Amino acid sequence: MEPASAFIDEKVKELGDWRGKTLAKVRTIIHEADPEIVEEWKWAKAKSPGTPVFSHGGIVCTGETYKSVVKMTFAKGAALKDPSVYSTQASRGM
């Protein structure tokens, strides 16, 4: 089985547009913020190729790509103390 980083590299290459560039940039920022981050590839199914996951003692965030957005979901995003961080009602359990 290929390492997760190879799957993420392939996803960036496969996208080949602004979404791939954005995912690659965010990936770089994540590694700069935490050099010990672990890349994983989770939730692959027949109709879904899977999702890049960045972990360090548990999931930190996922990087999902859609037609018009690149979505980073932070596992504990609603618990952040920074009031300038954007979060949705869904992430707060509302």
Image (cartoon, rainbow, N blue to C red):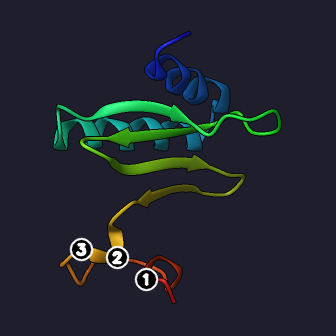
Q: Which disc is residue 78 wearing?
A: 2
Circle 2 packing at 10 Å, graded few (<14), some (14-19), many (20+), is: some
Q: Where, by quadrant of the figure, is residue 17 drawn?
A: top right
Q: Is residue 71 left or right of residue 45?
A: left
Amino acid type assigned to the residue bearing label 1 in the image: Arg
Q: Tell me: residue 90, above or below residue 6.
A: below
Sequence-first tag of 1 and 2:
2
Q: Quadrant of the N terminus?
A: top right
- Residue at the top extreme, as displayed: 1
Name the one closer to the observer, 17 or 7: 7
| Residue 12 located left or right of residue 44 | left
> The residue tagged with tag 3: helix, strand or loop?
loop
Numbered circle sitting on residue 71: none
Residue 26's place in the image compared with 40, above or below, is below
Label 2 sits on what residue type?
A: Ala
Q: Earlier in the sequence, mark 3 or mark 1?
A: 3
x, y percent for residue 35: 17, 32
Q: Secondary structure at mark 1?
A: helix
Badge 1 vs badge 2, beta-carbon distance below 8 Å: yes
* Residue at the disc numbered 1: 92
User: Nearest the camera: 74 or 28?
Assistant: 74
- Distance of mark 1 from mark 2, alpha carbons? 5 Å
- Can you give x and y, in whole percent of width and height, for residue 75 in the image? 38, 60
Q: Which residue is mark 3?
A: 80
Who's the residue at 44% across and 31% down the image? 40
Which residue is at the front of the view, 46 or 18? 46
- Determine the residue positioned at 55% across, 36% down: 42
Task: Tell me the CA gap for discs 3 and 1.
Answer: 11 Å
The crowd level at tag 3 (other Cα within 10 Å; few <14, some 14-19, many 20+) is: few
User: Residue at left 68%, top 57%?
Assistant: 68
